[in-house]
Amino acid sequence: MASGAGRQDHAEVYLEKKGFKRAEAAFYLGITVVTIDRLTKRGLLHPSRALRHPIYPKDDLDRFLKDTTGVV
C-alpha cells in the first residue's frame, strides 16, 4: 500500500452565505443589533420571517449598503 493510499483528498467547498441572522447581519453591516431592529421597523431592511428567526438576505443587505454609502 502506497503512502496516502486509502486517504481521500477532499476538495474544499465554499458556499456563499445567502442570508444572515440578526446579529450576523449587524456584523456584516458594521452596526449594532439595535440599529438592525430600527432599520427593519422603518422598512429599510426586509427580513424573511418564514423561519423561526428573521433572516436578512445578503442581496438586501448589499442593496442597503449601496443605497446608503455607495459602497458594496
Image (tube, grey):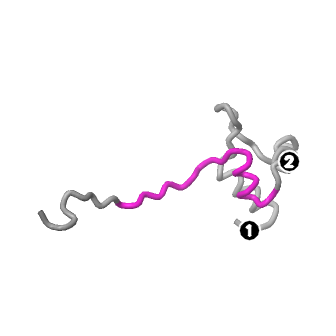
Rendering coords of residue 47 (x, y %) = 72, 41
Q: Amino acid at mark 1?
A: Val
Is residue 1 shown above or below 19? below
The residue tagged 1 is: 71
Rendering coords of residue 38 (x, y %) = 87, 45
Give the magenta range: 11-31
Picture quarter containing residue 63? bottom right
Q: Secondary structure at mark 1?
A: loop
Is residue 6 shown above or below 41? below
Residue 43 is inside the magenta segment: no
Circle 1 or circle 2, nearest the eye: 2
Instruction: Look at the image and tell me in which quarter the N terminus lies.
Output: bottom left
Mark 1 neighbour density, 10 Å: few (under 14) some (14–19) many (20 or more):
few
Q: Are the two marked residues, 1 and 2, in contact with CB atoms closer than 8 angstroms?
A: no
Front residue of 34 and 64: 34
Relative to 53, is 44 on the left or the right? right
Q: Secondary structure at mark 2?
A: helix
Picture quarter containing residue 30? bottom right
Mark 2 neighbour density, 10 Å: few (under 14) some (14–19) many (20 or more):
few
Mark 1 or mark 2: which comes first in sequence?
2
Alpha-carbon span between mark 1 and mark 2: 22 Å
Q: Residue at x 66, y 48 (%)?
A: 20
Front residue of 64 and 51: 51
Rendering coords of residue 11 (x, y %) = 35, 61
Instruction: Look at the image and tell me in which quarter the C terminus lies.
Output: bottom right
Which of the numbered marks, if any, corresponds to residue 34?
Answer: 2
Q: Residue at x 54, y 55 (%)?
A: 16
Q: Residue at x 57, y 52 (%)?
A: 17
Q: Amino acid at mark 2?
A: Val
Q: Residue at x 27, y 57 (%)?
A: 8
Is residue 72 shown above or below 64? below
